[in-house]
Image: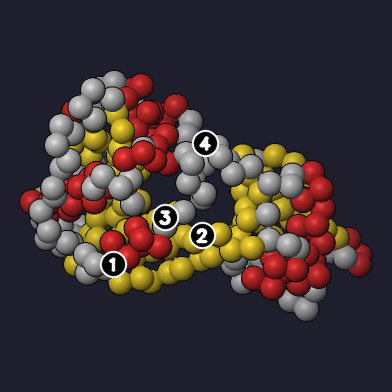
Amino acid sequence: MSAPWTLHGGHQQVLGAIGLRLSPAHGAEVMGGAFAGPAQHEAAVALLTAVLVAQPWLYAYAEAHLLPVEALEAAGLRQVSAYTRMSGPLPADLPSVPEGFRIVPLSEVESLPDRLAAQQTYSDMIGHTIVPPEFVLPGAGGCDEGLSRLAYDPSGAAVGICRVWRDGVEVACTTPGVRPALRASGLRRALLLSVCAAARAAGAARLKLEAWGDSEEQRAEDMALGLSVEVVTPIYSA
């Protein structure tokens, strides 16, 4: 994080604090906010106003305990997307991989440039942050690389990824990352269903699916697999 701000009330009481985390395509993400209480709205607006002078291009999550919707809107931000979490029985639909593409277990991918290129397919989506090289090392973050999947296009370029974490009979993943030009190709759905097929074969029964910056159409596609929305946190942008 960079450029931290704090807001103090009487007797040097801290009313809130904000820092910025750089985004690859959306300026910066606001971290922190104002403490709940009678002064929260005024404190949140004051903090956001100060931050916007230094960084006019930013986004923030509308979370009642830190940055309520009313404060974000009073500071001039507007909703542009959302974080969502869905869950449900592991979808049983079979993947249909676009012609010429390959989807392989992440455990079979030794090339770090391929891993990084695939992970960077999220970079234009709001809510996703800069990928450090160590994040794509084998086993990084504790993901199950045998269940995770990476996609190659007909030329052999890494163009998509879906990383998976397992906890007993439940698997958790972020919605697949796919190159922007390929998001209407069916590759995103094929990656997700490939992960589900591998997880089901390994004895899993439930799926938890998180998404940052997905479109309404993508969200509807995921719900059509039998998943139910548990959490929606609006993302506001300046």
State left or right for residue 17 relative to residue 116: right
Residue 147 vertical placement versus 35 (above, below): above
**3D distance between C-alphas at marks 4 and 3:** 17 Å
Hey, which residue is sitting farthest left in the picture? 201
For label 2, the residue is: 81
Task: For mark 1, give the secondary structure.
Answer: helix
**What amino acid type should be assigned to the residue bearing mark 2?**
Ser
The residue closer to the viewer here, 179 or 109, is: 179
User: Which residue carries the number 4 mark?
Assistant: 130
Q: Nearer the viewer, mark 4 or mark 3?
A: 3
At label 3, counting other C-alpha atoms closer than 10 Å, the crowd grade (few under 14, some 14-19, many 20 or more) is some
The crowd level at tag 1 (other Cα within 10 Å; few <14, some 14-19, many 20+) is: some
Question: Which tag, 3 or 1, sits closer to the chain's start?
Answer: 3
The residue depicted at 68 percent of the width and 54 percent of the height is: 238
SS at badge 2: strand
Q: Amino acid at mark 4?
A: Ile
In the rendered image, residue 18, in percent from the top left (x then y), is placed at 71, 53
Give the labeled residue for mark 3.
Answer: 214
Check disc 3 and report its element: helix, strand or loop: loop
> Measured along the vertical axis of the image, is residue 135 above or below residue 72?
above
